[in-house]
Image (cartoon, grey):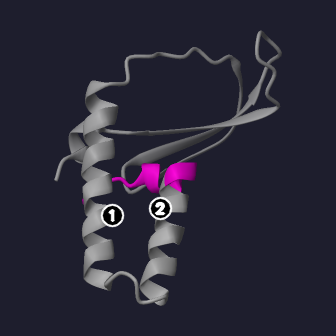
Amino acid sequence: MATFEMHRRSTIGMCLTETLDQMVSGGTLSPELAILVLVQFDKSMIEALGSEVKRRVSVKGHLHTYRLCDNVWTFILQTEEGQETVDTGKVVACDSKLLTY
């Protein structure tokens, strides 16, 4: 995987993909242009995540499952009660140096 497209699994990424699929199916948009839109979305998200996101989070809990696939770590956590109560959480992490085009 040359780039990580985790943001495509976000709500905005899934909505964009669904909308582009509908537009291509309806003949409103060519498949080539839809691909260009997705590539620009990928580039914009990578730039924004690299320069705009400054928050850090601390999570306490018990590690339920972990895996490494294509240089992406996924951790499934069973969290402890705190200020925000969540029964389980999923953390996905990757090497930011691999996010370039």
Residue 16 in the image, given as x and y percentages of width and height? 47, 61
Q: Which residue is mark 2?
A: 16
Residue 71, compared with residue 49, is above or below; it is below
Q: Is residue 3 magenta?
A: yes
Determine which residue is flagged by label 1: 38
Q: Residue at x 52, y 55 (%)?
A: 9
**Viewer-closest of 24 and 71:** 24
At label 2, the amino acid type is Leu
Q: Is residue 1 visible?
A: no
What x and y, as percent, mark residue 58?
Answer: 58, 14
Nearer the observer, 57 or 63: 57
- Is there a contact, CB below 8 Å, between mark 1 and mark 2? yes
Give the spatial CA distance, label 1 vs label 2.
Answer: 8 Å
In the picture as drawn, the residue positioned furthest to the top comes out as 83
Residue type at mark 1 is: Leu
Q: Earlier in the sequence, mark 1 or mark 2?
A: 2
Asked if residue 83 is positioned above or below residue 38 in the image, the reply reads above
Which residues are drawn in magenta? 1-12
Residue 1's place in the image compared with 87, above or below, is: below
Is residue 47 rendered to the left or right of residue 69? left
Residue 45: in sight, yes or no? yes
The answer to whether residue 96 is left or right of residue 94 is: left
Residue occupying image coordinates x 83% and y 15%: 81
